[in-house]
Image (cartoon, helix red, strand yellow):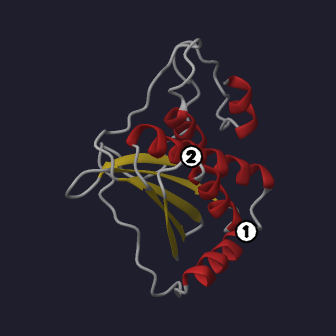
């Protein structure tokens, strides 16, 4: 099932996009909703701040996973950065990469733009309720819902990355655990 909504390129669209996605997840755990909200906020902020365009958020529930795509019409290409601790920005895609089960960037078609997507696994108890919520709001039946386009580009396979213990130079190992939204807030 797929739900899609377009937003303006105004800063007020960032919290609107976050609320839009979180409202589709009433039975997902509070911590998981916070992580998803943080990732949506980061991607929406990038569209407003760097692409300087409106954007579209697509939410797909399929096979125990939630996939969120944020597409813009900007001319640049998003990239994951490794900012110094003293730098005030540049952590958005790194946050999404670390919190998501899988993540990728693909170029837009035609006139430009790009799509950044992430996938998170949901527990069995909440996935059915989320699928019903998304299906009810989009008016689509699970059997007839089209799949969100493939071709994730940038060498991304769309398959979950194996969990890394070593998070890179200067960053402590996480012991195989995914950092929570709260721990990211404390880092930045």
Q: Secondary structure at mark 1?
A: helix
The percent position of residue 187, horizontal first and vertical second, equals 69, 24
In front: 115, or 1?
Answer: 115
Q: Which mark is residue 179?
A: none
The percent position of residue 143, horizontal first and vertical second, equals 49, 87
Q: Is residue 2 above or below residue 35?
A: below
Q: Is residue 96 above or below residue 130?
A: above
Q: Secondary structure at mark 2?
A: loop
Relative placement, left or right, of 4 versus 154 is right
Could you tell me if the residues under marks 2 and 1 are in contact, i.e. CB atoms within 8 Å? Answer: no
The count of marks equals 2
Tell me which corner region of the image, top left, top right, bottom left or bottom right, holds residue 25.
bottom right
Q: Which mark is residue 11?
A: 2
Relative placement, left or right, of 159 versus 99 is left
Q: Which residue is mark 1?
A: 126
Q: Which one is earlier in the sequence, the residue at label 2 or at label 1? A: 2
Near mark 2 (Cα within 10 A), the count class, few <14, some 14-19 or many ≥20, is few
Q: Is residue 172 above or below residue 51?
A: above
Tell me which corner region of the image, top left, top right, bottom left or bottom right, holds residue 127.
bottom right
Near mark 1 (Cα within 10 A), the count class, few <14, some 14-19 or many ≥20, is some
Residue sitting at x 41%, y 78% = 146
Q: Quadrant of the C terminus?
A: top right
The percent position of residue 96, horizontal first and vertical second, equals 55, 41
The label nearer to you, 2 versus 1, is 2
Residue sitting at x 37%, y 46% = 105
The percent position of residue 109, horizontal first and vertical second, equals 24, 58
Relative placement, left or right, of 14 versus 126 is left
Task: Give the CA distance from mark 2 to mark 1.
Answer: 31 Å
Residue sitting at x 43%, y 31% = 80
Residue furthest left as drawn: 110
Residue furthest right as drawn: 30
In front: 170, or 72?
Answer: 72
């Amino acid at each position: 099932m797929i739900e899609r909504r377009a937003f303006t390129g105004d800063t007020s669209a960032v919290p609107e996009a976050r609320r839009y996605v979180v409202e589709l997840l009433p039975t997902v755990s509070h911590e998981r909703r916070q992580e998803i909200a943080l990732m949506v906020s980061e991607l929406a902020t990038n569209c407003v701040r760097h692409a300087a365009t409106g954007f579209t958020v697509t939410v797909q529930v399929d096979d125990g996973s939630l996939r969120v795509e944020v597409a813009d019409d900007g001319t640049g290409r998003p990239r994951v950065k490794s900012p110094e601790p003293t730098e005030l920005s540049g952590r958005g895609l790194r946050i999404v990469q670390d919190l998501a089960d899988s993540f990728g960037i693909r170029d837009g078609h035609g006139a430009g733009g790009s799509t950044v997507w992430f996938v998170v696994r949901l527990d069995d108890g909440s996935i059915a309720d989320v699928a019903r919520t998304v299906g009810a709001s989009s008016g689509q039946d699970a059997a007839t819902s089209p799949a969100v386009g493939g071709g994730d580009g940038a060498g991304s396979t769309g398959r979950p990355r194996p969990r890394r213990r070593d998070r890179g130079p200067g960053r402590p190992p996480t012991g195989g655990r995914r950092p929570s939204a709260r721990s990211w807030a404390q880092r930045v």
